[in-house]
Structures are given as C-alpha cells and as structure tokens.
Amino acid sequence: MIDADGHMVEFLPAVRDEIAELAGAAVADGVETALTASQKARHMDAELKRRLGLFRLSWWAFPTSNTLDRAAALLPGLLHERLPELGIDFAILYPTFGLIALQIDAAEHRQAACRGFNQYYAALCREHASRLTPAALIPMHTPEEALDELDFAVGTLGLRAVLLPGFVSRPLPGENQARSARWIDSYGPDDPTAYDAVWQRCRELGVAPTFHSSAMGWGTRFSMTNYVFNHIGNFAAAGEGTCRSLFLSGVPHRFPELRFAFLEGGVAWGANLYSDLLGHFEKRGGTAIRQFDPAHVDRAQMKDLFERYGPETFQRRIDQLDESLTILSDPTEDPASLDEFRHSGVEKPEDIRRIFSEQLFFGCEADDPMNALAFDTRTNPMGARLRAIFSSDIGHWDVPDMNVVLPEAWELVEEERLDRADFRDFTFANAVELFTSGNRDFFAGTEVAEAVAKELGR
C-alpha cells in the first residue's frame, strides 16, 4: 500500500533555524511574517480585509481528538512506527506550511524559505527512508529559481519527489498590488514554452512534477467569513487550471516521458476535463474550426430569408445585416491563431486519450466516492481508465482518525464500484508508475522495494 500524498506538519521553530542559518535572521523574520499572516488577518475589520484582498483561510486545520495522530504528523519517526498499524507500507509526505512558502512574493524570502524547508525535510526524514520520503518544494516564479532548487533538492539533498506550485499569482500592471488584483499564471498557453527548461530538468533528474495548489481566493472562493465556502472544490479547480494549461501548451506532448500528478482534488474534474477537451477538439481543433468560418455564410441567401421571414423591425434594419453577422464571428481573425490546439501536439482524439490515460495522475482522498470514475470505462469516452492514486491526506483535518483511511478506501470495493484489480491499481500500481517513470530506483531500499521490482518486471 503506497500513500501518494500524506502530509507532515512542520515544527516551525526548527524550520526558522534552518532559514536563519541560510539567509540570516532578517530573512527568517520575513518568512515567519508570511507564514503567520492569517493570524494577523483574524483581527482586521471587513473593510480592511476586502481592500487587502484577504479571504478566510484554514482554521482548526488539524485533528486534535487523538493526540497520537497530531504528534505523528509532526514527528516522522512516530509516523514511521505507526504506518504498519495504518496498513500503509510506504508514504510520500507533502508539506503543510511549506505550501505557503511557494507563494511568498519577495524572491529572497521565497527562495530561502523553500531551501530551508527542503533541508528540514531531508534531515528529518533521512533515517526513516524505508517507509517515508518527503517532497521537495520547488518555487516557480521564474524558471531560473525552479532550476536552481531542483538541482539542490534532488542533486544535493537527494530528495526523490518534487512539489511544484500549480500557478504563480502575479500582480496586475499599475499601482493596485492587493492580492485580489492578480492574474493566475499557470505556465501557458499564452507563452507555452516559457518553462520548458524546467520540464527538461525534471526529465534529466528523473523526477515527476507533482502539483498541490489551492484555488481559495479565486473567483467566488473569496469569502472573508466562511472557510468551507472557500475550500470546497478548490484543489480540483487549481489542478484543472494547471492541467488544462499544460495540455494546451503541449507540455505532455513535448515531454512524453514525464508523468504529472495533481493532488488532493480527486479525479472527477480530470474525467470532466478529458471529456471536455475531446468535445472541443472535435468541433474546434485542427481543421474542424473551419466549419465556423464566417465566409461560409451565403449573404444573398441570408438577406432573402430575412426579407421573407423577418418581422418589420428587422426589415427596417436590413442594411445592418452584414454588420450584425460579424459580432463574435469576425472574418478577419488571424489565420495563424485559428487552431487553438496547435501547441498541444494532438492530431486525433486518440492522442488526448493517451495523454490522459498514461501521463496524468490524479490524487484522490480515501473517502471520495467519485474515485470510481477513474476506472469507469463505460462512462469515460473511448473507454479510458484514468490514473487515480491513493492519497490519504493524513495530518490534516480531512482525516480525523488515521486508522480509518484504508477502510474508507476499501468501501468502493465493498460497494462493487471497484474490483480488486482496480483497488490494487489505486493503492499501488499507479503510484509505482508515477514515481518510477523517471527513476526506477525511487523505491530502492524501502519496504515496498520487492513488490515494486515485481511490478516493474511484469
């Protein structure tokens, strides 16, 4: 049983020590201010929160009824000892407070924070590597900083899993720098190759890019008083935005060896995006877009039909018929931009199916009943099976009791919505494919090494 997305909760005083040693006390203070900003926001009035673009973030975010669970999230040694009790043989641990570090505005603070967290993760988990491995934070505000931290985290620290932010929240031009006045840069499609050096380095280092970003603060998820309102569907929205962007930018096409994972949002959004892309490609991809060319309209016939069937109010304005036909149907569109799938590299529906069924992975919490969609070949177009991966989310409030995670996942088998082979793929084989795709030794020396070797030898 491989947990593809558990969480550790960082002991921030120890992280602060790492950052202070790296970059000095002033930078450590700045990082601490960013990490604790939500506490300060609690005491602001509504007008100030609105002006600053603040929304209600997580609160009471950790399970507390069982102190052993609370401590296990903080102490990898304790979690390592408890994993057999939970029925989990190996876990990839993702950050908690480290997720905030990826979106710190100040470059010096952001980069120092990510490196400090990565050193903390590596040191804390090193002696527990038989059952645990941490995911390194890779900042993405620029390709250069991503490359620098990839080389350090993987090449120097030896970390095997990497976490990239699914987007960068960039300020809009002008003087309004509030968090609400941002645009979401998900690495394309307006500049589809801007981060190709990052994807190439991931390929060279043998790591699979994984994303675990929040869409709280986007669109309607902007309540100042209701965290549940902001939280529902937010990981799915963030994952969908990144996945859609990478697909239309052609990243999976240009880097077919890479596997990409979108965590904690489930798989339902992935099935919907897959279906939606197929539908759009059928009608607007490649040469299909030509069916909507305004030049196809027979103006003379249209005028005749207006004269025969149009009411008197239409007849009075018939001289404006041609002008009205160009609204949202302008004949002067740039011919080079007509095919909006041109960067994706797909030429036929089967190409979309291949990318979604082979290269993309979807992190699913144990109690999500929609996990069954991944394996539903009758519902997914072209009989596709999507790569759902078991992602416990232990350490966070989603899991009030660590001991019930696997029983909750097994309920889909009891309900006959998954068979045993599906469950094996969900809890083991798909994670093996994701993490060994670039590094066949990812699980070497771990409790699952023998089982993984058999799986790879099939």
Image (spheres, rainbow, N blue to C red):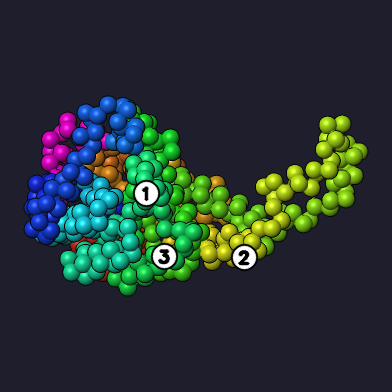
Find residue 193 and report its horizontal and vertical position in percent.
44, 66
- Residue position for label 3: 194
121 above or below 401? Answer: below
Q: Is residue 380 visible?
A: yes
Amino acid at dot 3: Ala
> Spatial distance from mark 2 to mark 1, Cα to Cα?
30 Å
Neighbourhood count class around disc 1 (C-alpha, 10 Å): few under 14, some 14–19, many 20 upward:
some
Judged by depth in the image, the label closer to the viewer, 3 or 1, is 1
Neighbourhood count class around disc 3 (C-alpha, 10 Å): few under 14, some 14–19, many 20 upward:
some
- Taking the spot 11% from the left edge, 51% from the top edge, the residue there is 26
- Residue position for label 2: 336
Q: Is residue 443 visible?
A: no
- Taking the spot 60% from the left edge, 61% from the top edge, the residue there is 337
Q: Quadrant of the C terminus?
A: bottom left
* Tag shown at residue 171: 1
Find residue 30 and report its horizontal and vertical position in percent.
17, 48
Extent of the magenta region: 58-80
In this picture, residue 303 sits left or right of residue 106: right
Precedes in sequence: disc 2 or disc 1: 1
- Decide whether residue 99 is among the magenta residues: no
- Decide whether residue 60 is among the magenta residues: yes
* Tag shown at residue 93: none
Find residue 437 and report its horizontal and vertical position in percent.
35, 67
- In the rendered image, which quarter is residue 125 located in? bottom left
